């Protein structure tokens, strides 16, 4: 996604792969291993879950801020397996979006920085975990094989597109690449990293998401 801009991220989650087999398969198909990286994600919300109740996700990944906003036509997810979000990246752009989304005092007007907004809106962390990621590129997709610090593993295949008109083609490309690498669907017991963390460690957020129909009770 472009720095400070917005892109639409189309993503599907799959069962964790055998990394050696995945690497070999991607290479056979003309793709490549892009990187190995570790990072820490911290997710924030207000005490009454004002963001997550609207399926809005505020994240700080290491030092980078990101806000994921649902794309209207895709407001309810298919059990968290497939998601379409508009991404806002960079502290300044995220701060501006948050001040439109949340009731905050305008005392500092245009001089507000994101730390002011966190304080004004009583935004505090509800999830905090590290991830080790192996990233591959194949076709028009990036493939991320993730293992989180709390023991959860998942594979994500995603395409970034400039606007909503590209979502259908992005989904078709994800399905094609998933088929090529033999991706297995997530079992109902598995969700993405954040969903699994919430189910295990953030009962108040889980309750809010269930009330809004964003997550099932399971």
Image (cartoon, grey):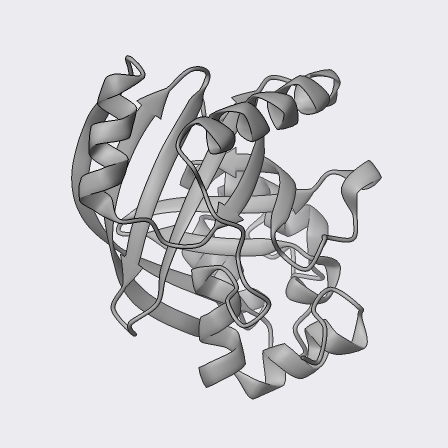
At a point 42% along the width and 15% down the height, the residue shown is 139
Instruction: Provide residue 192's location: percent of width, then percent of height.
Output: 49, 59
At a point 72% along the width and 22% down the height, the residue shown is 168
Instruction: Provide residue 102's location: percent of width, then percent of height.
Output: 69, 58
Q: Is the residue 48 above or below the residue 33 in the image?
A: below
Query: Does residue 28 appear left or right of residue 175 in this picture?
Result: left
Considering the image in quadrants, where does the C terminus appear?
bottom right
At a point 70% along the width and 72% down the height, the residue shown is 209
Query: Does residue 48 appear left or right of residue 22 in this picture?
Result: right
Residue 107 falls in which quadrant of the image? bottom right
Of residues 169 and 88, the one nearer the viewer is 169
Determine if residue 65 is in view: yes
Q: Is the residue 196 above or below the residue 106 in the image?
A: below
Residue 41 falls in which quadrant of the image? bottom left
- Single out the residue that lies furthest toward the right: 73
Report the label total.
Answer: 0
Instruction: Provide residue 120's location: percent of width, then percent of height.
Output: 56, 66
Instruction: Provide residue 60's location: percent of width, then percent of height.
Output: 38, 53
At a point 29% along the width and 74% down the height, the residue shown is 150
Of residues 110 and 55, the one nearer the viewer is 55
- Single out the residue that lies furthest toward the bottom: 203
Of residues 159 and 47, the one nearer the viewer is 159
Considering the image in quadrants, where does the N terminus appear?
top left
Query: Does residue 190 appear left or right of residue 91 in this picture?
Result: right
Determine if residue 6 is in view: no
Query: Does residue 24 appear left or right of residue 7 in this picture?
Result: left
């Amino acid at each position: 996604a472009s720095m400070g801009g917005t892109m639409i991220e189309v993503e599907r989650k799959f069962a964790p792969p055998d990394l050696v087999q995945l690497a070999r398969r991607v290479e056979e198909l003309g793709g490549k291993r892009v990187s190995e990286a570790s990072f820490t994600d911290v997710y924030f919300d207000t005490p009454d879950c004002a963001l997550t109740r609207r399926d809005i996700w505020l994240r700080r990944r290491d030092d980078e801020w990101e806000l994921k906003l649902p794309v209207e036509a895709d407001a309810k997810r298919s059990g968290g397996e497939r998601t379409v979000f508009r991404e806002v990246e960079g502290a300044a752009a995220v701060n501006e979006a948050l001040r439109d989304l949340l009731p905050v005092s305008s005392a500092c007007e245009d001089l507000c920085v994101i730390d002011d907004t966190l304080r004004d809106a009583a935004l505090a962390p509800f999830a905090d975990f590290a991830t080790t990621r192996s990233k591959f590129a194949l076709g028009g997709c990036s493939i991320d094989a993730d293992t989180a610090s709390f023991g959860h593993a998942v594979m994500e295949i995603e395409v970034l597109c400039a606007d909503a008109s590209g979502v259908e083609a992005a989904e078709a490309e994800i399905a094609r690449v998933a088929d090529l690498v033999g991706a297995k669907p997530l079992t109902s017991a598995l969700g993405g990293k954040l969903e699994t963390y919430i189910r295990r460690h953030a009962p108040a957020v889980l309750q809010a998401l269930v009330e809004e129909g964003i997550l099932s009770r399971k």
